[in-house]
């Protein structure tokens, strides 16, 4: 399941950054692109399935999702944000589930 979260975050990272080439460079677009870079790093780290990567995969997209809702409703409604919110809603629960599952594995 971690591979699903990793691939989704990598795709999301690319589409976040690609907004720099689609929209005027306003603060919300630059902020989204910055989150894209963060998502690319977390997506790559999730390929290693480490506990730290799972925490980052649970926290960063949750924050990004909240900011995305604000961006969509107040600043700049666009199709990218809808896609990114869908990815966030999938990735966060996967990472939380895997964190809980790892915690229940005897060492």
Image (cartoon, rainbow, N blue to C red):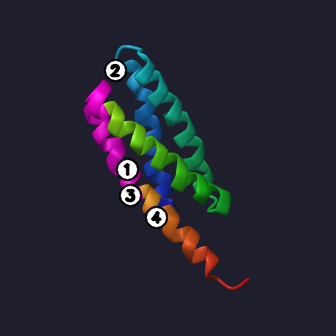
Q: Position of residue 37 (x, y in %)?
A: 55, 34
Q: Earlier in the sequence, mark 4 or mark 1?
A: 1
**Magenta highlight: main SS:** helix
Q: Earlier in the sequence, mark 2 or mark 3?
A: 2
Q: Residue at x 41, y 14 (%)?
A: 25
Looking at the rendering, the stretch of residues picked out in magenta corresponds to 72-90
Label 4 secondary element: helix
Q: Position of residue 39 (x, y in %)?
A: 52, 42
Cα distance in 3D space between marks 1 and 3? 5 Å
Residue carrying label 3: 90
Label 3 secondary element: helix
Residue carrying label 4: 94
- Cβ atoms at labels 4 and 2 below 8 Å apart: no
Q: Residues within 10 Å of mark 3 (few under 14, many from 20)?
A: some
| Picture quadrant of residue 83 | top left
Identify the disc placed on residue 87.
1
Cα distance in 3D space between marks 4 and 2? 30 Å
- Cβ atoms at labels 4 and 1 below 8 Å apart: no
| Picture quadrant of residue 54 | bottom right
Task: Identify which residue, 9 or 66, lies in the foreground.
Answer: 66
Residue carrying label 2: 22
Q: Earlier in the sequence, mark 2 or mark 1?
A: 2
Q: Residues within 10 Å of mark 1 (few under 14, many from 20)?
A: some
Q: Nearer the viewer, mark 2 or mark 3?
A: 3
Q: Residue at x 37, y 37 (%)?
A: 68
Q: Residues within 10 Å of mark 4 (few under 14, many from 20)?
A: some
- Cβ atoms at labels 3 and 4 below 8 Å apart: yes
Label 2 secondary element: loop
Is 1 positioned to the left or the right of 90 in the image?
right
């Amino acid at each position: 399941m971690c591979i699903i979260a990793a691939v989704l975050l990598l795709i999301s990272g690319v589409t976040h950054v690609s907004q720099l080439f689609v929209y005027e460079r306003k603060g919300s677009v630059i902020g989204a692109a910055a989150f894209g870079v963060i998502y690319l790093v977390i997506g790559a780290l999730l390929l290693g399935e480490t506990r730290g990567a799972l925490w980052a995969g649970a926290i960063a997209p949750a924050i990004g999702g909240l900011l995305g809702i604000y961006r969509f409703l107040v600043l700049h409604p666009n199709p990218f944000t809808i896609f990114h919110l869908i990815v966030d809603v999938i990735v966060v629960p996967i990472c939380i589930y895997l964190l809980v599952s790892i915690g229940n594995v005897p060492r």
